Image (spheres, grey):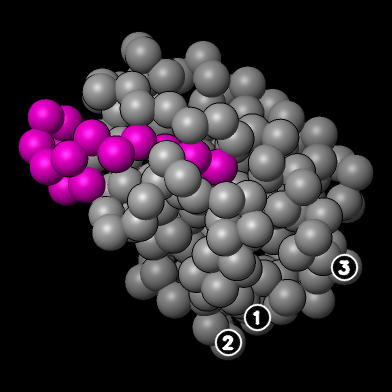
Amino acid sequence: MSKLTFEVAFDRLIGHEGNFTDDKNDRGNWTTGIIGKGILKGTKFGISAMTYPDLDIKNLTLEKAKEIYKRDWWDALNANKIDSAIVFQVWDFAINAGMATAKRKLQSSVNVADDGIIGPITLDAINKSDLNDVLMNFNSERLVYYTKLSTWPRYGKGWTVRVAGQLKYAAMDN
């Protein structure tokens, strides 16, 4: 059961996600998720046009972003059922790389089928695993995932710094 509250997690997240960006080379900024196709609406507070194509990204308020993160990300992850040292790691990765990817990498970290469902089997495996092993395995999965992306040369340094920061939070939460 997580001791980390959504409020604390959100404050941490906004330390990484914030200002409006409309980098044309970032597929998340396009409504189709394909560079050069659809509308370049951008990303703000980590909320992307690719994930929310009908949202007015540029005029998104922090309050609305917080509501979206609680409803569509925190609750969808079953965050209140995951140990606090793990939950922020997975939640942050979900926001950065997609919910399905984060869930599958967490499942790989505890050696269960990576079907993207954080249900009783995955939760039981997490609870039976050594916490530090889960944290190290998960962040290893995360870094390997990033290095396989075609955008690694452009964004890899930032992703690596982000993971380093998350490891500090994992140590605090552990």
Label 1: which secondary element:
helix
The picture quadrant where one finds residue 145 is top left
Residue 55 shown left or right of residue 70 in the figure: left
Residue 66: in sight, yes or no?
Answer: yes
How crowded pointer 1 is (Cα within 10 Å; few <14, some 14-19, many 20+) is rated as: few
Most distant residue in the left direction: 37
Identity of the amino acid at label 1? Answer: Asp
| The magenta stretch spans residue 66 | no
User: Which residue appears at 68% of the width and 41% of the height?
Assistant: 14
Residue 21 shown left or right of residue 159 in the figure: left
- Compute the Cα span from label 1 to label 2: 6 Å
- The numbered dot on residue 124 is 1
In percent of width and height, residue 157 lies at 51, 15
**Segment colored magenta:** 31-45
- The numbered dot on residue 112 is none
User: Which residue appears at 49% of the width and 49% of the height?
Assistant: 60
Asked whether the beta carbons under mark 2 and mark 3 sit within 8 Å of each other, the answer is no
Identity of the amino acid at label 3? Answer: Lys
The picture quadrant where one finds residue 114 is bottom left
User: Which residue appears at 65% of the width and 58% of the height?
Assistant: 63
Magenta portion: prevailing SS class? loop
Q: Earlier in the sequence, mark 2 or mark 3?
A: 3
The picture quadrant where one finds residue 69 is bottom right
Where is 66 relative to 169, above or below? below
- The numbered dot on residue 120 is 2
Asked whether the beta carbons under mark 1 and mark 3 sit within 8 Å of each other, the answer is no
Q: Which is closer to the viewer, label 1 or label 3?
A: 3
